[in-house]
Image: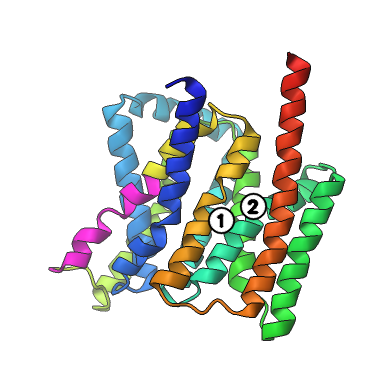
Amino acid sequence: MDNTQKGVLYTALAYLLWGILPSYWRAVSSFNDYEILFHRIIWSFVFMIIVLAVTKKLSPLVKETKSLFKRKREFIALIIASIVITFNWGIFIWAVNNNHVLQASLGYYINPLMSIALGFLFLKERFTRTETLAILLAAIGVLYMTFSVGTFPIVSVTLALSFALYGLMKKVVNINALYSITLETFFILPIAFLGIALLTTDQKTYFGNNFESFLILFSGIVTAIPLILFSAGAKRIPLSLVGLLQYISPTLILLQGVFMFGEPFTLTHAITFSCIWSGLIIYSLSKWMQYKKSIKIKL
């Protein structure tokens, strides 16, 4: 297996694991959404520390952290990234456990186009014609759902916007991906511990002598493993290929929402998703053709 094949395998596995996360969150849904989020933060940090200790990267992490404190712009960006990804995790967990899985799926389909929009607004990146068309189609889909159902798909847009903003912050920070996720969870760790303490004091915690309490211990693993795989895979393959593979995740989320959790897929959903899928196909084909042209030029 060559380097590119490994990259495809690792990246596809990462998106596959992200795609089946709704089933895991449903399995621990006896916990309230806040408690699930707090446990996810705590056990993600614990697991990352174990990974770094086993790979003998704890000392480099300490050095990198000290260096990061001196780079104020990057340090602030990483703190913002930590807050934004925590918010994203919380919204996703709430969506899954409150019968909004289709909206969550829609959010992650929209995400690449939201990232383009943020790049235009904050990084002064220009839209190509195909990107403009793709964004317009996505906007039409969202507006159609809003006027048909009478409710703005706030979950979808919030998930897409928060993850796009997270990606924007990560562009500012020049740090190893493993160190980044460790520090992101570390920054928010005090809030997670405080939340667990308050729930325990008020006797509202579900954590105890039950199977779901055992399952929740794996929340760190299911969070960190896809990130590690993605970090290993994405650097081995072109960004255009990463862009194509990323649709594995929302597709699996959509399928679980319809076939496992019984959420209705109405005509409104079909039209909305069709608009967004059309935009994504146009955008993805454009990026793939650009990649092919760049390969020919190099040859």
Toward the left, the furthest residue is: 209
Q: Which corner quadrant of the image does residue 135 belong to? A: bottom right
- Give percent across and percent down for residue 271: 69, 72
Residue 17: in sight, yes or no?
A: yes
Is label 1 in a helix, a strand or a loop?
helix
Q: Amino acid at mark 1?
A: Val
Residue sitting at the far top: 299
Do the numbered discs 1 and 2 sit on residues whose CB atoms are within 8 Å? yes
In the image, residue 18 sits, relative to residue 296, either above or below, namely below
Residue 10 higher or lower than 131, as above or below: above
Residue on which the image places disc 2: 165
Q: Quadrant of the C terminus?
A: top right
Q: Which residues are magenta?
A: 209-224
Q: CA distance from mark 1 to mark 2?
A: 7 Å
193 or 288, which is in the foreground?
A: 288
- Quadrant assignment, res 197: bottom left
Instruction: Please indicate, yes or no, whether residue 94 appears anywhere in the rendered image.
Output: no
Residue 293's place in the image compared with 88, above or below, is above
Left or right, residue 34 beside residue 133: left
228 relative position to 53: left or right = right
Q: Is residue 224 above or below residue 201?
A: above
Dot 1: few (<14), some (14–19), or many (≥20) neighbours within 10 Å?
many
**Amino acid bearing label 2:** Leu
Tell me the residue that label 1 is attached to.
84
Residue 32: where, in percent of width, then height? 34, 74
Between discs 1 and 2, the one toward the N terminus: 1
